[in-house]
Image: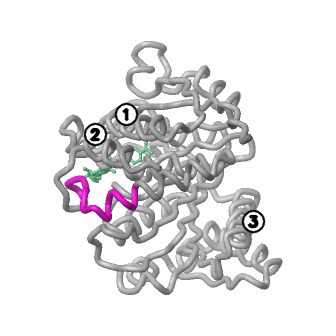
């Protein structure tokens, strides 16, 4: 007799823009798969600011700390004014220091390359995202880029441990240490020091601009990429473009006390409410979450159903199809076995 796994409580952030649409699609698939999950809704962003005076209420942080895991759809950040990014605050407050973004060719999806299999690992807590900006004199502003030995060593160690566990062969640190000799220089030094303890994994480095060109010309030469926060943000989107776009690429924000799973993409205001959003990126983030909470069987079942859906030619418009978000979700759910 097989025993039913205990139900796991997960904090759920439905987000803004396409967030609620892709969340509904993913929840429908998780439900159809019978995944033993119970969701605790948490509201952040503009609505939370209006209702509670804070776009990231303490209640939400408490919920994630208690459950240790969250599934999160994208949350909008006002550009050039307004509240500071909920996404950045969440990562910093919960010390979700590692942002893991596997970028893999999806069979059945038209893309420029085949056989892409990269992992982008982004330091998630410092760099130019420290939020330290001020006006020096009118017309002159300063944004501080913070790089510390502690955080750089911690993310490098995470990357090598990940590579070891997952059988990855090479880690490339991406930087601009030729110009930012102190900050990126420190990041690179920490990487090299940690690399020395993992002789079985190849370690090299590239300057960020040249790395971007190489990624576009020949992504095959890369395996795991390790980047500071800003370069990691930019290169993640670039890497998503290699396999068919932002609608496909999942992500995990990992720390010692909690993990928040979310897609690489944002709220996609240009298509919000039109039923065109691709739920794959959030669905694959949920698949990463299921593995993280030790429910790998459900992860595999969902992945198989997703691939079977693509193999049947069913796709959302961003990847050349005509299915709506909910039609796509129904087709995936129908293929769960
Ligand atoms: P975006 O990622 O929302 O959109 C970029 C392009 O990709 C758009 O053309 C969009 O339609 C398309 N796209 C993105 N996800 C898609 C999906 N699932 N299916 C089909 N097409 C998809 O980036 P953008 O426009 O720069 O940012 C919009 C908002 O999202 C901003 O307020 C930004 O701050 C926020 N954002 C939030 C993130 C998070 O919560 N982690 C991450 C990135 C951006």
Give left or right: position of 24 versus 185.
Answer: left
Give left or right: position of 126 versus 218.
Answer: right
97 in relation to 9, above or below: below
* Residue wearing tag 2: 326
Depth check: 100 or 145 in front? 100
| Quarter location, residue 216 | bottom left
* Residue wearing tag 1: 24
For the point 44% across and 63% down, the residue is: 236
Look at the image and name its color scheme. Answer: one colour
Earlier residue among tags 2 and 1: 1
For the point 56% across and 67% down, the residue is: 227
For residue 252, say whether it is visible: no
The stretch in magenta equals: 306-318
Please tell me whether residue 309 belongs to the stretch shown in magenta.
yes
Depth check: 150 or 37 in front? 37
Q: Position of residue 192 (x, y in %)?
A: 73, 78
């Amino acid at each position: 007799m097989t025993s039913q796994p205990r139900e796991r409580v997960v904090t759920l952030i439905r987000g803004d823009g396409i967030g609620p649409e892709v969340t509904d699609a993913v929840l429908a698939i998780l439900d159809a798969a019978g995944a033993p999950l119970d969701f605790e809704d948490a509201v952040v962003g503009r609505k939370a600011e209006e209702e509670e005076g804070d776009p990231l209420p303490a209640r939400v942080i408490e919920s994630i700390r208690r459950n240790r895991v969250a599934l999160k759809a994208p949350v909008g950040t006002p550009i050039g004014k307004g509240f500071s990014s909920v996404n950045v605050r969440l990562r910093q407050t919960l010390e979700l220091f590692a942002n893991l973004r596997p970028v893999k060719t999806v069979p059945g999806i038209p893309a420029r390359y085949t056989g892409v299999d990269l992992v982008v690992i982004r330091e998630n807590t410092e760099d130019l995202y420290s939020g330290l900006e001020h006006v020096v004199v009118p017309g002159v502003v300063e944004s501080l880029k913070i790089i510390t030995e502690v955080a750089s060593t911690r993310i490098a160690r995470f990357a090598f441990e990940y590579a070891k566990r997952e059988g990855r062969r090479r880690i490339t640190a991406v930087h601009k240490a030729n110009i930012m000799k102190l900050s990126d220089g420190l990041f690179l030094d920490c990487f090299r020091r940690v690399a020395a303890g993992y002789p079985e994994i190849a370690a090299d480095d590239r300057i960020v601009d040249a790395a971007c060109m190489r990624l576009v010309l020949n992504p095959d030469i890369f395996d795991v990429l390790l980047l500071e926060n800003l370069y990691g943000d930019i290169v993640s989107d670039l890497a998503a473009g290699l396999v068919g776009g932002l609608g496909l690429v999942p992500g995990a924000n990992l720390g010692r006390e909690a993990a928040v799973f979310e897609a690489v993409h944002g709220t996609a205001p240009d298509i919000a409410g039109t039923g065109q959003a691709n739920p794959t990126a959030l669905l694959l983030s949920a698949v990463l979450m299921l593995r993280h909470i030790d429910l790998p069987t459900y992860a595999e079942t969902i992945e198989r159903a997703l691939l079977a859906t693509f193999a049947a030619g069913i796709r959302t418009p961003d990847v050349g199809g005509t299915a709506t978000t909910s039609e796509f979700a129904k087709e995936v759910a129908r293929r769960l076995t």
